[in-house]
Amino acid sequence: MEMYRASAAQVAAAIKAGEVTAVEVMTEHLARIDEVNPAVNAVTTLLAETALAAAEEVDKQRAAGVPLGPLAGVPLTVKENIHVEGSATTMGVPRFRELVAAADAPPVRRLRAAGAIPIGRTNLPDLTIGGMHTTSTLYGDTRNPWDPNGRTPGGTSGGDAVAVATGMTPVGLGNDSGGSLRIPAVFNGVAALKPGYGRFAADHRLGDHEPTLASQLLPVDGPIARSVADLRLVCEVLAGADGQDPRAVPVPVDGPVVTKRVGVVTDPGGHGVHPDIEAAITAAADALRDAGYLVEEVTVPALDDALEVYAGLISTEFSLAWPAIRPLLAPNTQLHMELSMQLRPPLDLAGYIQLTAARLGVQRAWTKFFTRYPLLLGPVSTELAPPPMVPSDAEQHERMMGPVRLCTASSLVGAPAVAVPVGVFDGLPLGVQLIGAMYREDLCLAAADAIEQRFGVLTPIDVRLDRG
């Protein structure tokens, strides 16, 4: 097997068995990036020199009989808003192109300790503010390999999703605060794990500036991979308390056995759903039934309240920082954020404080839901991947962001979720998500694995890369 087509688990096993060297694996992935990246523009910065040196060290350890980690020699891409020692955390904007990290962020440090090797950095929207599409001032547009001209790769972790989908890496590390892992995963035919709040340690500080409340509660770092098994492997490496992040909890990866009951929602909020998305959810529900799950139609708890709280928290906090943030952004990204604040006006202090109370009420409603339905199956987006563009007016903004409302609500709650493909419809990959109670990533992964067993792994792909 060509190593760029192998899963992370297969790569690590082959290196441990001596079937291939870590240097050979790294060299093949670097060649794959050289071949594919010009067509899709997902990898922004190559870390070839340090990656090959780290691969050589893995090979020396194996030759010396040193036990290897579970991800030994596995290439890893990292989104450009996560610190990698010796590499700039540009966040896609010129202002930070010289902001070289002095140390790895916690998830990068943990993955390195398990043997994974950063091979490159990946594209994202300016400051991760760009709606559904991955385009940055520094690096331009990332393209969806399934339809480079007609469909966005999604955002904001679109660079990692495309890199994984096209075989440039078996694992990408991105983040999600409202769908930013799950959306590009399903748009590119790969899988993603959005961990629950506190499950993985993270550090999103720029310098010594601590994030404000919404930026503490909503964004989480997590993996994109081609298989659910690889997501599970990375989850086991990243889970646990960490001295660098007081939010990270010492909770076991596997929780107690619960009833295999799944609530399914096709059209959260009743705003409409594309028939192909509806068919994908039905197919996933059938796969779960065949795997022994009880599947019942449900209504998402407190959905409208969740959307109102999320929008109010984000809008209010961004409005305070907007004078400093605005000059860093490209005009189209500025407009996206201005439309967001226009549609969801910032609140005064009393209103903002009330939203922090309302958030707890939403969490309480979801917790009650999960006592009966340990899992919720639903769409990542109720519409197909839109064109590769940033919204230019309020109508476009609502049309692009409204369909991902289930992602928005689950991020507010802090619940874990796994996005998994369910096949190809009319030439485009489609997928679903499984959302679980706090710290029950294990349940999400198990159900996603049952779906993957039915529909298989769709990537890496070579199709359409030659279409300019």
Image (cartoon, rainbow, N blue to C red):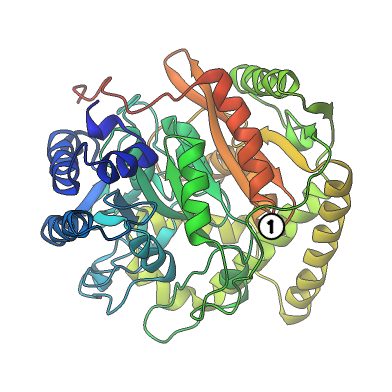
Residue 296: name its quadrant.
top right
Q: Is 269 in front, or is 278?
A: 278
- Residue 386 visible in rendering: no
Work out which quarter of the rendered image holds the N terminus and state it.
top left
Q: Is residue 205 left or right of residue 104?
A: right
Q: Is residue 154 above or below residue 322?
A: above
Can you name the residue that lies furthest to the bottom here? 208
Extreme front residue here?
A: 65
Residue 78 visible here: yes
Give the structural element (helix, strand or loop) at label 1.
Answer: loop
Q: Residue shown at 74%/57% (left/top)?
A: 308
Give the side of residue 217 with respect to residue 375, left or right. Answer: left
**Residue 241: x, y in percent?**
57, 72
Closer to the camera, 33 or 207? 33
Image quarter for residue 458?
A: top left
Q: Nearer the viewer, residue 432 or 11?
A: 11
Residue 312 drawn at (x, y percent): 68, 64
Q: Quadrant of the C terminus?
A: top left
What residue does disc 1 label? 439
